[in-house]
Image: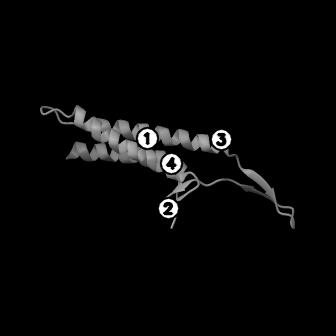
């Protein structure tokens, strides 16, 4: 079973870098005297959201919808490419990454 369609797998790559960046930044910024408030988590989430937003816009710009004509009826149909990851369109991933970053910071702040 495919879990992505088109270039939807590109939505996973920023999440990978998001996790690595958040972990490394938390390890560097955490001091023994001050608690860490999720600096790496929020910065990584914003960076991943910005990257996936840019990638989605780039893919949409490079692949505009094609208009096909049904030969029997003469009706025009616009066909556009779908880029999904786990059946979620790529254009929604910036919001998911942003919500995950804010939710992670809220969880860290209340712990």
Q: Which residue matches tag 3?
A: 61
- What's the mark number on residue 8? none
Local packing at callout 2 (Cα closer than 10 Å; few below 14, some 14-19, many 20+) is few
Q: Earlier in the sequence, mark 4 or mark 3?
A: 4
Q: Residue at x 19, y 47 (%)?
A: 111
Up/down of 96 relative to 74, above or below:
above
Up/down of 92 relative to 31, above or below:
below
Q: Residue at x 54, y 38 (%)?
A: 54
Residue 108: percent from left, percent from top: 24, 44
Q: Which residue matches tag 4?
A: 10
Q: Earlier in the sequence, mark 1 or mark 2?
A: 2
Q: Nearer the viewer, mark 1 or mark 2?
A: 2
Real-space CA distance between mark 3 and mark 2, rounded to the nearest whole angstrom: 24 Å
Q: Residue at x 20, y 34 (%)?
A: 30
Real-space CA distance between mark 2 and mark 4, rounded to the nearest whole angstrom: 12 Å
Residue 24: percent from left, percent from top: 28, 38
Real-space CA distance between mark 1 and mark 2, rounded to the nearest whole angstrom: 20 Å
Q: Is residue 21 left or right of residue 27?
A: right
Q: Which residue matches tag 2?
A: 3
Q: Earlier in the sequence, mark 3 or mark 2?
A: 2
Q: Which residue matches tag 1?
A: 48
Residue 19: percent from left, percent from top: 34, 45
Q: Is residue 50 left or right of residue 67?
A: left
Q: Residue at x 63, y 44 (%)?
A: 60
Q: Is residue 37 visible?
A: no
Q: Nearer the viewer, mark 4 or mark 3?
A: 4
Element class at badge 2: loop
Q: Is residue 7 left or right of residue 17?
A: right
Real-space CA distance between mark 4 and mark 1, rounded to the nearest whole angstrom: 11 Å
Q: Earlier in the sequence, mark 3 or mark 1?
A: 1
Q: Are marks 4 and 3 in contact (CB under 8 Å)?
A: no
């Amino acid at each position: 079973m495919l879990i992505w369609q088109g270039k939807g797998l590109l939505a996973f790559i920023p999440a990978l870098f998001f996790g690595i960046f958040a972990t490394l930044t938390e390890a560097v910024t955490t001091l023994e005297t001050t608690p860490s408030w999720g600096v790496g988590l929020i910065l990584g989430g914003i960076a991943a959201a910005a990257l996936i937003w840019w990638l989605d816009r780039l893919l949409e710009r490079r692949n505009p919808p094609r208009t096909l004509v049904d030969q029997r009826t003469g009706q025009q149909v616009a066909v556009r490419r779908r880029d999904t990851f786990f059946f979620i369109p790529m254009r929604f991933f910036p919001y998911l990454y942003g919500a995950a970053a804010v939710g992670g910071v809220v969880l860290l702040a209340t712990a």
